[in-house]
Image: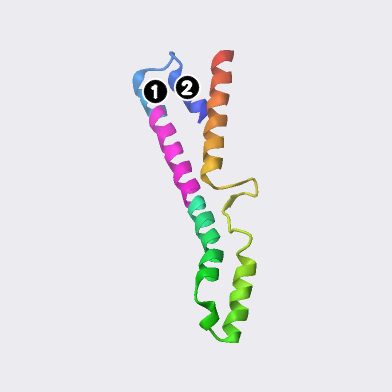
Amino acid sequence: MSLSALQATSGIINTQIAMRHAAYIIAQLLHLYIACWLGQQVIDHSDRVYTSTYRGEWYESSPKSRKLLNMIMLRSTSPCTLTVGKLMILSLPSFSAVVRASASYFTVLRSVR
């Protein structure tokens, strides 16, 4: 993103190419946001499994079902996440960190020119 932004803001290229780079940056941001938003949804919904299981009417179920509910509650203590190549977890804070880092890299590259 930062290299595309650098190319879009350089005065060497014409307006049509700059608009193409700007559209590419918007598409990259949108793609990253949707992936991170879906990852955040997975995290949020997996957090709700424990509370939903606990708040349910588990006391009215059979003893066998109660044992299964205990297993569900034990598993749901650690949330499910979507990761990108074991590097980072897809979530809205990670989207913010990537955009912030990209803007920082763009600023450094722009000042070097």
From the viewer's side, name the closer residue of 88 and 63. Answer: 63
* Residue 33 in magenta stretch: yes
Residue 15, position as x, y percentages in the image: 35, 19
Corner quadrant of residue 23: top left
Q: Is mark 2 on a helix, strand or loop?
A: helix
Q: What element carries label 1?
A: helix
Residue at image location 54% in from the left, 60% down from the top: 46
The type of residue carrying mark 1 is Ala
Corner quadrant of residue 64: bottom right
Is the image coloured rainbow, by chain, by secondary structure, or in one colour?
rainbow
The type of residue carrying mark 2 is Gln
Q: Which of marks 1 and 2 is nearer the N terminus?
A: 2
Q: Circle 2 sits on which residue?
A: 7
* Residue 48 in magenta stretch: no
Are dots 1 and 2 in contact, CB under 8 Å? Answer: yes
Q: Circle 1 sits on which residue?
A: 18
Magenta stretch bounds: 22-38
